[in-house]
């Protein structure tokens, strides 16, 4: 019998900060050009975020114990009712349906917690992401004037 590797989504812990920092720091600038989750990718900064969060959620994607991506639902700690979704999947694991998986995980999380709407922002030139988001029901509602990203919402409930 061939043993298959496992794929898990679980909340990130402080001890995951080092590997997340390493993974993000070793990605090419081109691959990360539209992804702006943190002020920097240092272990210290990521630990600070994970340590100080209260209601915000940071979920890791683990393939055979290896962190291969993460997604976040944040804004709760700042009092927003509509969380902001953001995702990063390692370039080594891109185009395998993992971003879609995180979206459906986020939808279920929102439904279970009676969160009515999910928001995300996407760079206007990120056509692959825009196509995915629109395909699964996100609707453009505006533009973030600070960074020029398109704002999308999806009704969950």
Image (cartoon, rainbow, N blue to C red):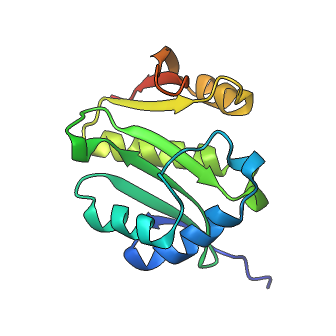
Question: Where the C terminus falls, by quadrant?
Answer: top left
- Relative to residue 80, is residue 77 depicted above or below? below
Q: Horizontal and vertical percent for residue 27?
A: 72, 60
Which residue is the extreme one toward the top? Answer: 141
When asked about the image quadrant of residue 35, the answer is top right
Q: Position of residue 20 (x, y in %)?
A: 55, 68
Q: Give the image location of residue 95, x and y in percent.
A: 77, 48
Tell me, yes or no, if residue 11 can be seen here.
Answer: no
The residue located at (30%, 29%) in the rendering is 116
User: Above or below — where is 52 with respect to 124?
Assistant: below
Q: Is residue 73 above or below residue 154?
A: below
Q: Is residue 26 visible?
A: yes
Q: Is residue 150 left or right of residue 131?
A: left
Quadrant location, the N terminus? bottom right
> How many numbered tags mark residues here?
0
- Residue furthest bottom as drawn: 1
Residue positioned 38% across, 75% down in the render: 14
109 and 81: which is toward the camera: 81
| Residue ranking furthest to the left | 79
Task: Name the residue located 25 percent from the left edge and 37 percent from the top edge.
Answer: 114
Quadrant of the image occupied by residue 106: top left
Judging depth in this view, the residue of 45 and 72 nearest the camera is 45
The residue positioned 34% from the left and 41% from the top of the image is 110
């Amino acid at each position: 019998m061939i043993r298959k590797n496992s794929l898990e989504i679980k909340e990130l812990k402080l001890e995951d900060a080092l590997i997340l920092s390493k993974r993000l720091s070793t990605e090419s600038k081109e691959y990360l050009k539209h992804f702006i989750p943190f002020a920097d990718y240092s272990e210290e900064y990521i630990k600070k975020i994970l340590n100080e969060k209260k209601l915000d959620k940071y979920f890791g994607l683990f393939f055979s114990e290896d962190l291969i991506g993460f997604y976040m639902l944040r804004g709760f700690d700042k009092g927003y009712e509509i969380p902001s979704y953001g995702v990063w999947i390692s370039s080594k694991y891109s185009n395998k349906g993992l971003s879609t998986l995180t979206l459906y995980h986020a939808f279920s999380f929102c439904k279970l917690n009676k969160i009515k709407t999910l928001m995300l922002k996407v760079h206007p030139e990120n056509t692959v992401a825009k196509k995915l988001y629109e395909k699964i029901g996100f609707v453009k509602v505006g533009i973030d004037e600070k960074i020029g990203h398109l704002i999308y919402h999806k009704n969950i409930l």
